[in-house]
Structure formats: structure tokens, C-alpha cells
Image (cartoon, rainbow, N blue to C red):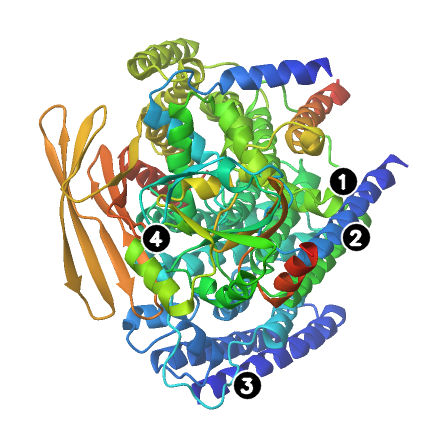
Amino acid sequence: MASLIGSYSLSFGLLFSVLIIFFSLRNLKNAEILDKKIITLTFIQFFFVVISFFGLIISFINSDFSNETVFNHSHTTKPLFYKISGAWGNHEGSLLLWLLVLTLFISIFLIKSNQQPKKYRIFTLLFQQIIIVGFFIFLIKTSSPFNYIFPTPNEGLGLNPILQDPALAIHPPILYLGYVGSSIIFSSALAAMVTSYVSKEWAKHIKQWVLASWVFLTLGILLGSIWAYYELGWGGFWFWDPVENVSLMPWFALTTLLHCILVMERKKILTSWAMILSIATFALSMSGTFLVRSGILNSVHTFANDPERGLFILIFLFTLIFLSIFIFIFFHSGKEKIENNFFWLSKETSILINNWFMMYFLSVVLIGTIYPIFLEVITANKISVGPPFYNKLILPFLIPFLIAMAIGPNLNWVKSDFKDKFYMMIFLTISFLLSALIIKQFDINFLINTILVTSAFFLFFSTSREFFVKRFRNLSQNIAHFGFSLLILSILFNNIFSNEVITNLKIGETFTAEKFTINFENIEQEDEKNFKAIIGKFNIQYLDGSTDILNPELRIYNQPNIITSEADIKTNLFTDKFMTMNYVQNQEYFNIRYQVKPFMIWIWISVLLITFGGSLSFFNKRYEI
Amino acid sequence: MKSKFIPLIFILIFIITFVIFYKGLKNPNIYTPSTNLEKEVPPFELKSFENDSIIISEKIFKNNDYYLMNIWASWCIPCKVEHEFLMKLKNNEKIKLIGLNYKDNFKNASSFLNDLGNPYDLIVSDRDGTASIEWGAYGVPESFLIYQSKIIKRFIGPINNEDLLEIQKLIR
Amino acid sequence: MKFIHIFLIVINILNFNLLKADEIKSENEIAKNLRCLICQGQSVHDSDSEFAISLKLVINEKIQQGMSEEEIYSFLKMKYGEWILYDPVFNRNTYFLWLLPILIFLAGGAIIIKKFYYKK
């Protein structure tokens, strides 16, 4: 029943798109003000999508296995929370969620933009409707969440246990808020070009949306990363997997846009660039969807691969790209006023430098991700592009980037000179000595690591000092930059000082490493409702005499029949201790992985700080960037 | 002039990208290594399946016979599927079947053979899976057709009827 | 071409992977640079598949035999194809992969400089 209602509401929703487009076009010609009818229609459309979405959730809660999506991804024994999150934990449901956010955001946009020119609002709505219609058709034609199966199966196939995780349950909605927010930026940029509204006012108005999408996207990526760390049992938080890269690319573009908009809201310069970035951000989000859902890339994410879906998104994506190129060429006049005067040493330049590096990082990730596809199609050679590639091309460039980031925010607009040279020199010296001292103890990759850590420390000290000097001015930016320095420091320390052992151990055996010994004491069996657990007991002794007891687990689930390994993680402020145990076919030993990961928790904290900084400027204008 | 030129280049790039993505959609996204990477039989020294005697590869493949080296395990489900085709090869005079028992234990493996029949002339055991890597294998089952110490054909995954016919044709 | 050479040397110096670390470390380093053929999104280091576990044993064995990191890579490349290496080699197929980002970086710099140059 719920499925049926959901299915019908979808069709009604699509119908309303037609109505909205019709009334918008009429309103465009005739009236002076925006027709109230259009706003009402948009709300009704949103309402229909909400009903459809709830229809799916209710089908999941009721375990209505006559619905194909529910049958494929749910099970009666699943906890309620995961039944609900299961609604968007699959391809069909997640697209419905996209659509929900799309219609939600355009409604919010219409309310929030009542100070803006009518034509601009209508055009934004029209472009947004093009996207919405595209998604409606995609959903209904190729991936309907409401397919009916008869006869009704008694039991569903179940949700992969590694997807049953709280972080992963809220990861897609948050991430989509970011992705879809970029669709508003896209539509509004196109509308601004068509109506010649590319101006400071536009920049001020769209900044809110840029910030919001950026905050959500950052949080979404963070949640995905946290999930990977706790659930995948590999002990890492970033793998340069295509799916991760795909979320990182729009993030780079958005971050660039955010900084670019800051300049644009003060002066009418960099307008073409801002337009290109607005288009690129959404195009990258969409290509991400394409790359992940079409199965063209080989990644850990498992969505059912269907070339038909891939083809649809591909055509849709390129239609949008060509539409925007067309509008950009014919409507956008790149002529900027003579306001274009700022000097070498100025905040403008430092923002340009930020943009420059961000674009470089973006291009590394983009090229690394899609190059294998190109190579395979052209030469039939198959290669892999993995972490070493990204590290080699990104790490060296991080050094000047961090230093520029430390200096930039202290400069004045238009013209400036180096301020506080004294402090800068002191910070640089302290940073260098400190890093040399720390790295020397470990004597690995001395040169690069010292320079990297130095630049990160430099940024850390500079941003810390700004808290005292600037007080509440620019607090938002200050917190975000401080968070970024903390992030880089924690990642570097995490990388440099992590210590890991992978070995095969039998029960009762001991493994001696340089700094600790692992003692595999015994195993226990426990029977749970939907899985059987084998729990290992490990005693780890360190050189200084302290000990840790870790209990990694193997879980043998009954539905679907999957063996997962649950890591045991001991977290404290400075280090995480991470242990997993894996079953090896027909051997007496288990495969043991033990890792000591310093500053793990600080990676999460610092990203939270960055997003906190970003969202601060929503609440109080005083802190604004 | 210049302002028209740059967008044109971009449009061209996007069209090329489109075509490549379109073609890329048709390629399988799972990688399987090319089946003619390795030609020489990699040397090994392994324990025999039945007892602890050491078997050296050079002593096996030296004759002027055809050999089918089959990697299998009792816990591997596709191995059961291919087993009937291996049994059909057993009676062929021209080919000798060598089994490489992968990460298995003796009890399970011998009951597997008792139930389904033993097609192998010789079985060696690869307890920790390292020998299979020397062969460039990465899963079970995999089979290699060998003649005069050269791998002439490699089969990834279970042998099916088509593969069987091909083998019979090759060794004729 | 000269520039490319210098650039590669600089990159290599900056990333020079520890010369002589202890065994566990380099075994892990090597496994991290290899892609698992069973769970194809993972590195051999991260993967717990039967293949990956055995491959780690093989790497260890090869290190014991005195093979260098490079030799192990080329050994595995011969067995499984270039695909298994996460760090693409710099050759005809990958010129663009390595150089395009750098070209984009240089072009970006040129655009910024031009912006100032034009004004004066």
C-alpha cells in the first residue's frame, strides 16, 4: 500500500514539474512580481516527494517484501534504525533522497530569495526544474524504488552488515545536502548569467548557499571516513578509492568557490571564474554520481551496476554541461570594471593563490581517478592509480600552500605589506626546530617530513596567534583555518608515527615486535541473535611495562551469510590502538593486524572544527568571513 | 577570435570525454589478468598431498606429455562444478592431471575426492597459498595447460564444457 | 624535457621511501602499493582475502631471499600485469597522467601572473 502511494506520488511530482515550468514561463513574460502560484506549486511538488519518500520508509519499516527494493536490502530481524536507514542505503532509495533534497532546496531558495530580482528567481527555478525533471525520469524509468514482486517473498535478502553502522546511516543524507546544495549554486549561476545579474549582490546572496553546501559536504565526507575507519577494519581513514575521490573533487571546487566569492562580494572581479566554479562544482557532483552508479570504476562501494543507468546519467550530465557552456559563451560578458586593481601583496592575491593550489589538487584527483578509464578505452592497457600517485603529487605542493595559508589572511585587501615580520620569523624558526626535533627521533624520510611538519606547525602557530590579535573579527575563517592546520598536523603525525604489524598467530603464540609483544591468549564463542561471534583475547605488552587487552571479533552473520571482522579500538587523546583478527582457510592460525595510530581522534576533531568554523558565520554576522 | 577559440577547445574536450565514458561503460570493471602473461612453468618444491615427500616441479613436467595443472580446494564451491569435466579428462591417455590443493586440510580434501572421484594423477599441496602466487593465480579454481614445460593455455575460474572441448582439441 | 627530468628528480628526492627500514615496515610498504585482485578496491595490505594473506607471505619470503622492493614489484608485474601496482610507472602510457596536473599547475600560475602583467 505504502509503496503504491509512493509510486503514484512520484508521477504526480513529475507532473507538477510541467506545471511549474509552464507557469514560470508565463510569469516571466507578464507580471512584475513572482507569481505566488509558482511557490505553492513548488511546495506541492516537494510534498509529493516527501510522501513518496515516507512511502518507501514505511515499506521498509513494515518489511513489505512485495517491494523489490525492500526485498533486496532488508530483513525482518534487522533493528528498526537500520530498517529506516536501509531506505536510502541502496541505489534506488538514495536517488529518491536526492530528489527529496532537490525539491526541498528549491523551495527554501524561493523563500529565502525574496529580495532578489524576479527574473533571476524564475530562471533559477527553471534551471533547477530541468535537473529535477531529469532526476524524476531517471528514478521512474531506470531505478524505481517501488517495483512490485509477485508472489511476495517471505523474507528479504538482508543488508550487508558492514553497512549497518550509525555513521553510515546518516552519511548519505548529509553528503547529499552538500551535493544538492551545489545544484542550487549551479542553477543560480546560470540564471545570473542569463539575466545579467552577476554582481556583488549575487555573490552576497549565493554565499549562504555555498557555505551551507560546503559545511554539509565536509561533514558528509567526514562521516564516510569515520565509517571506513571503524567498520572496514583496515585501520585507515582515507584510501584514495574512486568513490572517496569523487566526493573530494566537488569539495575542492566548493572550497575554491567559497574563497572566490569572498572577493566577488567586495568587488566585481573574478566573475567568469566564479561562474566556471559554480558550474564545475555541480558538474563534478554529477560526474561523481555517474562514476559511482554506472559501475565504470572499480571501487569498494557496491551499488548494483547497470550500464543503462550509467548511460542515462552520462547523457544527462553532458546535456547540462553543454547547456552551461552555451550559456556561458553567449550570455556571460567577461568584462569587468576597472575595479580590477589590487597589488602583488594583498588579500586578493593570496586568495588567487588559494584558488590556484586548490585547482591543482582538484586536477590531480580528477586525472588520477579517470585516467585509467581513458587509457583502457584508448590503448586497452589496464593500470591502477593509487595512494602513492596522490601522495607524490600532492604532498610537495602542500608546503607552499600551507605557508601561503598562514600569511594570506593577515594581509589587507588591495594593498598590503608583510605584517608582523618578527612574529612570522619566530614562528617559522620555532616550527622548524620543533619539527626537526620530533622527526629526528624517528628518522624516517627526514627531509620531506621535516619541511612538511614545519609548514603545518607554521600555519598552526600563525592561526593560533590570530585568535588573540583579531579576537572575534573573522572568527569563522580563523577557526576553519586553525582546524585545517590541526588536520594536516594530525594526518602527518598519524602517518609518520603509526606503527603496525600484520602477522599470522596461533592461539597461545606470542609475536614480538620492536616496541611491543602481542600475546594471543585464547578465543571465545558467543551466539547472538543474527550472528555468531568468535572473540579473540589479546594481551599487548609495551616496552615501558604497560599492557593493553584487546578483543577483536569475527562475526558470522546468518542473513546474508557473511563473515565480518569487528575491530577492537582503544581510543584515547593521543593514540588509537586498533586490532583486527581474520579467519584464514584451513589454517590453525588467524591473521592478526595490530596498529598503533597516533592522533587519530584529532583528525575527526579538526574536521569538526573546520565545519564549525564554516557554520559559525550563519549564526552571527559578526563572525563572518 | 581568441575568445571563440577557447570555448571550442573545451567543447571538443567534453565531446571526447563523453565518447570515452560511453565506450568505457561497456568495458567490464573487474580486472582479470591477461591469460598469456606467463609462459614458462614456474619451478616449485612442494609437499605431496598424501605424505610429506617433496615433489619437485622439474621432475613432473619433463615428459613429452600434456599436463593440466589444476588449483582446487574442497572448500571452494566452483571446484565442485568443474569436477565432472576433470573426471572426463581423467580417461584421456594424452593428458596428465596435476592437482594443486590450495589451503586445504587433508581430511576435507580426501573426503571431497572420495565423494566425487579423483581425477588427478598427482596431487601436491599448497598449504599457505604461496605456490599459487608463483603461478600467477589469485583464486580457486584455476587451471594451466602445459606442454614441454610451457604454459600453452590458462583458465581462470571453473572449467566448463567449452573449455573441455578446447583442451581436447589442443591435445589431439 | 630537461625541466621534466629535474622535476622528477625533485619529486623522487622528496618522496624517497625509507632506505633501510626494518622488515615489517618494508613488507607493509610494499603491500600498500599493491592492489588486491580479489577485492579490487583494496590494497593487498588492507585486504584480508585469501589471496592477499598469501601474497603477504610471498613478499616476506622474497625479502628474506634478498630481493629488493623494485624486484618484487617487477616479479608481481610479470605475474599479474601492471594493474597490480598502485604506483603507475612513468612510461609512454602514463606521461599524461603524471605531467598533466603539473602542466595545469604551471598554466594556473601563468594566468595569475598575466593578470598583473596586463594591468601595468
Q: Amino acid at mark 1?
A: Gly
Q: Nearer the viewer, residue A172 or A536?
A: A536
**Disc 1 to disc 4: CB gap under 8 Å:** no
Q: Please tell me which of labels 2 and 3 falls first in the chain.
A: 3
Q: Is residue B81 above or below residue A550?
A: below
A114 lies above or below A14: above
Q: Identify residue for label 1.
A: A334
Mark 2: which secondary structure?
A: helix
SS of the residue under disc 1: loop
Task: Measure the alpha-carbon separation of dots 3 and 4.
Answer: 55 Å
At which x and y percent is residue A565? Answer: 29, 53
**In this view, the mark in front (1 or 2):** 2
**Residue A565 in the image: above or below residue A88:** above
Q: CA distance from mark 2 to mark 3?
A: 36 Å
| Residue located beneath label 2 in the image | A326
Amino acid tagged 4: Asp
Residue topped by disc 3: A8
> Is residue A395 visible to the viewer in this orientation of the structure?
no
At which x and y percent is residue C62?
42, 28
Q: For mark 1, does the 10 Å Cα neighbourhood hold few (<14), some (14 to 19), or many (20 or more) residues? A: some
Amino acid tagged 3: Tyr
Residue linked to disc 4: B104
